[in-house]
Image (tube, rainbow, N blue to C red):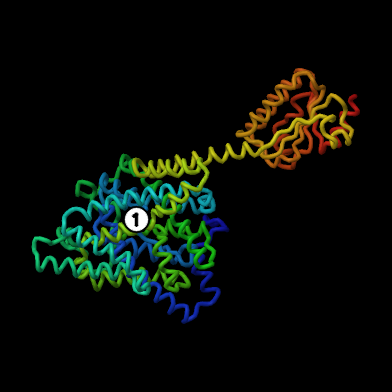
Amino acid sequence: MSLIPAHLRLAGALRDTLREGYTGKLLRADLLAGLVVGLVAIPLSMALAIACGMPPQHGLATAIVAGGSIALLGGSRLQVSGPTAAFVVVLAPVVKAHGPGGLLLATLMAGAVLVVMALGGMGRLIRYIPYPVTVGFTAGIGLVIGGLQAQELASSLPSVVVGLLTLAILIVWPRLLRRVPAPLVALTIGSLIAAGLAAWYPAWTVDTIGTRFASQGGIPAGPPGFHLPWLFPGADGQPLVVDLALLRALIGPAFAIAMLGAIESLLSAVVADGLAGTRHDPDGELLGQGIGNLLAPFFGGFAATGAIARTATNIRAGARSPVAAVTHALFVLLAIVTLAPVLNYLPMPSLAAVLLMTAWNMSELPHALHTLRRAPRADSVVLLTCLVLTVAGDMVIAVATGVVLASLLFMRRMAEVTDFRLITPQADERVATIGMPEGVLVYAIAGPLFFGAAQRAMQQLDVIGGRYWAVVLDLAEVPAIDGTALANLESAVSRLARGTTLVVLSGARPQVAAALDRHGLARRWGHVAVCGSLDEAAALLQDCT
C-alpha cells in the first residue's frame, strides 16, 4: 500500500504539461523566461543569504537545488522558488544562535514538516488564513527588512552614494525598458560607480562581496558540493553538535519556516494562477516545497519557498511550464561556475538597495494603508496587531495571534447572523393556520447554532417560565449545530421539562437531526418530542389537548 494518498500527485504540474504536449516553441519561451528570472535571482539570492547572516553562495545553492527540484516536483506550473525576503526575520535569529549548521538543520526539519502537511491534505487549509493577517505580517516583514538594509546603506558616506544611485536606477529603469531586468542594470552601474570611486578616491572604497567574505575566499567557483547539514559550523565556528537540546531548540524555528513557507508558496501560486489563468494543486505544491527543503541543506542551501516577485517576472517573460523555473536554476548554476570572480565585485550597498526595493514591494504599504482606511474596524485591528507584533516581536506569534483574533471576530459575526424569534399563534398567521393550539410558543431559530450563538439563543427560553404549556423549537433554518449548542439546549430543555412544559423539536435538517439523535436529548427527557415539521408538531400538540 502506498504511503502517498491518492489525491496527492508528485510532479503534477510537469506531468500535466507533458501530457498536454510540449513543443519546441514552448521550450524556447521557457528558456528565455528562465534566463530573465535567473538574472534577477542571482543578486537577490546572494543579498538574501547575506541578510540572513549566511555567506552569499548559500543563497545561490538554495536557488539552484531548491528552485530546480520544487519546479520539477511541485504542483504549480509557473511558480519560481528560492530564498525570499519573508524568511529573513525567521532565519537570521537561527543563524545568530546556532550558526549556518543550525539553519541548515532547521531547514531540513521544516522540509519534513511540509511533507507531512502535504500528506495530511493541509494545502487546502492554508487558504483560510484571513486576508488582514497576511497583509499585516507581510507589511511588518517588509518594514523589518527595510530597516536592516537602511542601516547597511547608511554605514558610510560612500555607501550612501552607491546605494542611493543603485536604488534610483531600480526605481526608474522599469519605466524606461522593462525587457532588461532592472537589478541587472542597477548592479552593473552600481559596481562601476563603486570601482570608479575606489580608483579615484581610495578613501571612498565600499565593501564588496569579495572583501566582506575575504576570509572565505569570496564566492567559490563551481557547483554546490554535497555536505551533511550537521557538519556545517555552529555559532562558535566549530562543527555543529547535534543533540536533543539542539533539536528541541530548532523545533520552533522549523515549524515557523514550514508555516511561513506554506503560506507564501501557496499565496504565490494563487498569484501565478491569477496572472496566467492556470490552476495549481496546493497539496502537490506543498509536497514539492517539502522535498526541495529536504534536499537543499545537503548542498548548502537553506529555506526556500515560492517567490512572488520572481514568479511574476517569470510569467511576464513568457514562461509556459515548470521548465522555465528549472532553466532559471540551471542558469544560476552556470553563472557561479563561470562568473564567480565577477560576482565578488558586487558592492554591498548595491545589494542592500536591491533588498530595500524588494522589501518595499513585498510590504505593499500603500495597499495596507488603503485596507486600514476602508476595511471594517475589527479587521483593521487584526491587521495592525499582526504588523506591530511582527516588527516588535515574533512573526510566528504575530500570525498565530492574528488568526485567533480573526477567528473570534468571525465567530462573533456568525453569532450575530443567527436570528431568534418568539412566535405565538395570535401573532403569526401561518402558525395559527396550521392549527397550533393556544398556549403554545414557537421559538424559531435561523442560522448556525454553535457556541458563539447557543447561549444567547437559549437565554430567551429562560423568560418563558410557566406561561406556556408547550414550546416548539423550529430548527428548520439551522444548518449546523455543535456540542456547546447541544449542551445549552439540553440545559434549557431540562428547565422547561422540570416545569412540566412540553418541548417539541421540529424540522431539524439531516446534520442537525443526526447530532440530536447521537446526543439522545429526546430519550433522556420524557417531556421532549421530535417532529419533522411544524405541521406535524401542531398535529401532535392538538392530540395532547
Given residues 309 and 102, the one toward you in this image is: 309
Task: Tell me: residue 473, above or below residue 12.
Answer: above
Q: Amino acid at mark 1?
A: Ala
Q: Quadrant of the N terminus?
A: bottom right
Q: Is residue 34 left or right of residue 447?
A: left
Task: Tell me: residue 285, above or below residue 29.
Answer: above
Query: Which residue is tagged 1?
Result: 359
Q: Is residue 482 left or right of residue 504?
A: left
Q: Residue at x 91, y 28 (%)?
A: 543
Q: Residue at x 23, y 51 (%)?
A: 151
Q: Position of residue 459 (x, y in %)?
A: 67, 26
User: How many labels were placed on the picture?
Assistant: 1
Residues packed near mark 1 inside 10 Å, few (<14), some (14 to 19) or many (20 plus): many
Given residues 116 and 122, the one toward you in this image is: 122
| Residue 178 visible (yes or no) | yes
Q: Is residue 259 left or right of residue 16?
A: left
Name the secondary structure under disc 1: helix
